[in-house]
Image: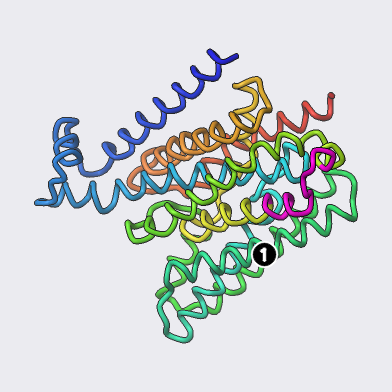
């Protein structure tokens, strides 16, 4: 088992490194591998090629890797919270709640003439995600069936999306395009200034998740078992959902809503590792999310270049079949 786990992590790390390099290398402005290596390692910013790499491509690659990992980890924590592998921030409407709050902030900034700071976007996204999560938790207390809960989450997502479209209609012409592109999900507009915010926020979320791993392992056996070990179940559940909300809100604030990553990646990680141990699934989910989003972002950029697809379009193509297989497998079981 240790050999398998080590091999999986080595493959994920190698895939992440390779995809990061290809994402930086591929683009409308052609570069040789030697030239790219010189730009990266010598930190040469003397020409247009260097500025394209350092100011456009590299921040995007960092965002895809870090935010992709954060989204997958957020999904894993939600799955632990609801004790069901089909839970995820996009399907349960949590990402849509964050999207609505950030859209409202953007429209308000446009109407009242103030600038939107990174901390304002994160704060708005966290509030929106927390409100949507509260509705989902309330629904979970009223229904026993996970399928009904998913339907409730999808309906919350539709309501938030409809409200977002309504807000967009009040935005001025100069901001409608940017707001619309962001609402579809994209890493294209991420800058190093944004990275100053999402890197530490994600680091906090990952660190707290690692600290919660032992508790998650006990919690997966049931609340009664966790309580018998001396855990404060209420405090643990609060920490779990707050950490998940922080991670999903951070992603929504800087990249918009991204579909299926939070469900598909943790499931694949568990299957690949043949283990449900949170101590290995948590880092595997983060690395898997990074690899998945780097791969999907590469396709979104280059598949129909120079036209670019939204990241959610590509993640849905690969993530939706995995979710369908999970549902069918659960039904057969």
Q: For this view, does 7 lie left or right of residue 211? A: left
Q: Quadrant of the N terminus?
A: top right
Asked whether 90 or 282 is in front, the reply is 282
* Residue 128 visible here: yes
Q: For this view, does 85 lie left or right of residue 171? A: right
Disc 1: which residue: 160
Circle 1 crowding by C-alpha within 10 Å: few under 14, some 14–19, many from 20: many
| Residue 32 image point, x, y percent | 17, 32
The residue sitting at 58% across, 40% down in the picture is 210
Instruction: Note whether 134 is above or below 36 in the view shown.
Output: below
The residue sitting at 70% across, 65% down in the picture is 131
Q: Quadrant of the C terminus?
A: top right
Residue placed furthest toward the front: 230
Dividing the picture into quadrants, the one containing residue 104 is bottom right
The stretch of residues the image draws in magenta is 227-240
By secondary structure, the bulk of the magenta-drawn segment is best described as helix
| Residue 201 image point, x, y percent | 48, 55
Dividing the picture into quadrants, the one containing residue 295 is top left
Asked whether 207 or 112 is in front, the reply is 207
Q: For this view, does 287 lie left or right of residue 241? A: left
The residue sitting at 51% across, 51% down in the picture is 204
């Amino acid at each position: 088992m240790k050999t398998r786990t080590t091999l999986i992590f080595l493959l994920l790390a190698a895939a992440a490194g390779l995809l990061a390099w290809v994402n930086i290398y591929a683009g409308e402005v052609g570069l040789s591998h030697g030239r790219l290596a010189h730009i990266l390692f010598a930190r040469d910013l003397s020409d247009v090629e260097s500025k394209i790499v350092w100011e456009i491509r590299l921040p995007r690659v960092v965002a895809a890797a870090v935010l992709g990992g954060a989204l997958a980890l957020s999904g894993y924590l939600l799955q632990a919270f609801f004790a069901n592998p089909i839970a995820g921030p996009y399907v349960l409407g949590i990402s849509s709640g964050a999207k609505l709050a950030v859209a409202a902030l953007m429209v308000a900034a446009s109407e009242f003439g103030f600038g939107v700071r990174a901390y304002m976007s994160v704060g708005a996204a966290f509030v929106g995600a927390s409100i949507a999560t509260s509705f989902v938790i309330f629904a979970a207390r009223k229904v026993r069936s996970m399928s009904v809960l998913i339907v409730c989450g999808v309906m919350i997502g539709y309501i938030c999306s409809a409200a977002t479209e309504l807000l967009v209609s009040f935005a001025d012409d100069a901001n409608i395009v940017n707001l619309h592109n962001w609402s579809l999900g994209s890493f294209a507009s991420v800058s190093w200034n944004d990275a100053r915010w999402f890197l530490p926020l994600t680091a906090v979320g990952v660190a707290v998740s690692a600290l919660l791993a032992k508790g998650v392992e006990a919690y997966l056996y049931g609340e009664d078992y966790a309580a018998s070990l001396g855990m404060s179940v209420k405090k643990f559940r609060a920490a779990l959902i707050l950490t998940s909300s922080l991670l999903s809100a951070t992603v929504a604030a800087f990249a918009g809503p991204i579909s299926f990553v939070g469900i598909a990646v943790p499931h694949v990680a568990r299957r690949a590792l043949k283990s449900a141990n949170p101590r290995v699934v948590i880092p595997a989910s983060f690395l898997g999310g990074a690899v998945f989003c780097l791969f999907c972002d590469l396709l979104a950029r280059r598949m129909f270049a120079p036209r670019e697809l939204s990241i959610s379009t590509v993640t849905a193509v690969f993530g939706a079949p995995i979710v369908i297989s999970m549902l069918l497998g659960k039904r057969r079981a």
